[in-house]
Image: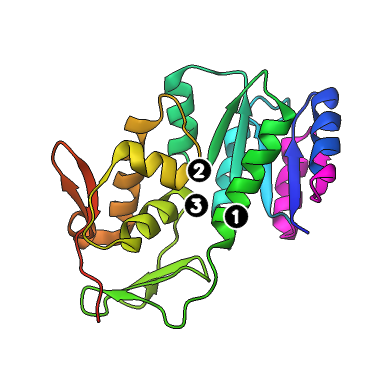
Amino acid sequence: MPTVLVVEDDRDIRDVLRRYLERAQHAVLTTGSGAEALRLLAVGQVDLVLLDLGLPDIDGTDVLLAARAARPPVPVIVLSARSTLPDRITGLTLGADDYVTKPFSPAEVVLRVGAVLARVAGAAAPESVPTYGGGRLRIDAAAHQAWLDDVALDLTATEWGVLATLAGTSGRVFSRFELVNRVRGYEFSGYERSIDSHVKNLRHKLGPDGAAIVATVIGVGYRLGWSRDD
């Protein structure tokens, strides 16, 4: 049973989310304190964080960054009254896996929690781990992990989704709109262009070969630049 940590200073919202999440068979921890959220993350028993950035004691982005720094990284869905496109893009660029603006439907939040957890869990284990670029890049869908030159890549859930989607059909060009819907699992209005930020971060983590591995097709979108090995 996955454990969801709800970090929200409004008690009514915390209680509503707890009820809905427990009905969906999630274990739930709740707190209105950012410091307590950091302590719970340090314990290492949290599978996903629902995070209000406007906390009374510390900046919610500190909790977001701590979740991303955990090993393995803990996915985060931001709950925020900040609804402008720049605010959403900032939250996603910092590493949030989803961004939900207030007021929201608790039922929709539960669906988004399920979608993020499913992406993190990955697909069923293949018989062998596919490799690309003459064995330099390995992508293990079951382990939700990729390696470049035998070094594990520390990817956010969205960065992983981009890489796994492109690798799933090596050489195929995906438009930004397709990547949004494949990676996010739903249509996110205004998010299409911000996929570029995640691609930029992914390329940075791939090092000098980043732009060759995640290749831009001008006017269309992105494709995996390295072919899958036989």
Q: Position of residue 137 (x, y in %)?
A: 30, 72
Q: Which residues are magenta?
A: 22-45
Mark 1 / mark 2, whichever is N-terminal: 1
Q: Which residue is mark 2?
A: 185
> Of tags 3 and 1, which is closer to the observer?
1
Residue 40 highlighted magenta (yes or no): yes
Q: Which residue is mark 3?
A: 157
Tell me the residue at 79%/50% (across/down). 26
Q: Which residue is mark 1?
A: 118
Q: Quadrant of the N terminus?
A: bottom right
User: Residue flagged by tag 2: what amino acid is it?
Assistant: Gly
Reply above or below: 49 against 212.
above
Residue found at the very far left of the displayed protein? 218
Callout 3: SS = helix
Reply above or below: 206 against 51.
below
User: Residue flagged by tag 1: what amino acid is it?
Assistant: Ala
Tell me the residue at 43%/40% (across/down). 181
Residue 107 visible in the picture? yes
